[in-house]
Amino acid sequence: MRLVIQRVKEASVSIEGVTHGSIGKGLMVLVGVENGDTVDDARWLANKTIALRVFDDDNGVMNRSVMDIGGEVLSISQFTLTASTRKGNRPSYIRAAGHELATQLYDAYTEMVAQRLGRSVPTGVFGADMQVSLTNDGPVTIIIDSRLRE
């Protein structure tokens, strides 16, 4: 699984012009699921997301997590994170998990984040054409791949 995590002042996802989910200060997370990913990957990433220290402490040092600041998380499924551009200029999505596995792991990740955060996590709709808006704070953008475990 791959995540793109952005520290945001606010973020929202709309479908057909209607806001489906929104947050204030916190993390907007794009979630991509690949063939071979497991619930263990979702668990590892959920723990990493909640513990990631990307918010400033009183000294202006990124030393606080979303939990520490009482922030929110918006989770958006995005299969294009699995793209390969090795051959030519047209991305290949051959590594993307099928619908059943992808929805299962995306939902598991989102539920685990919500449990650890102690609050609901707004989402988009898996497979929908979504419009995502955000104010990236910093900007701070982190990419995490569960296969690399770094």
Image (tube, rainbow, N blue to C red):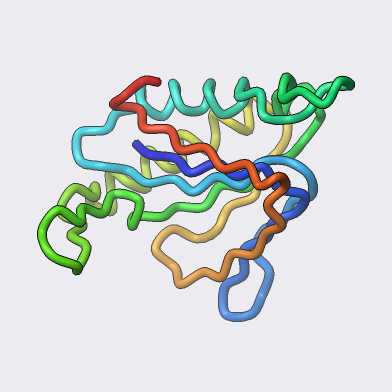
Identified at 43% across, 58% down, the residue is 126
Q: Quadrant of residue 147?
A: top left
Q: Position of residue 110 (x, y in %)?
A: 53, 38
Identity of the residue furthest to the bottom in this view: 17
Give left or right: position of 44 versus 63: left
Q: Position of residue 86 (x, y in %)?
A: 14, 53
Q: Is residue 63 above or below residue 78?
A: above
**Residue for point 44% across, 23% down:** 43
- Residue at (67% x, 42% y) in the render: 7
Quadrant where the N terminus sits is top left
Quarter of the image that includes the C terminus? top left
How many callouts does the rendering have?
0
Q: Nearer the viewer, residue 92 or 89?
A: 89
Residue at 53% x, 21% y is: 47
The quarter holding residue 88 reads bottom left
Please name whichever residue, 28 or 118, is drawn nearer the observer in this view of the structure: 28
The residue positioned farthest toward the right in the image shown: 58
Relative image position of residue 60 (x, y in whole percent):
82, 26
In this rendering, is residue 111 above or below 11?
above
Seen in the picture, residue 114 relative to 27 is either above or below; the reply is above
Quadrant position of residue 148: top left
Eyeballing the image, is 125 above or below 122? below
Q: Is residue 63 left or right of residue 3?
A: right
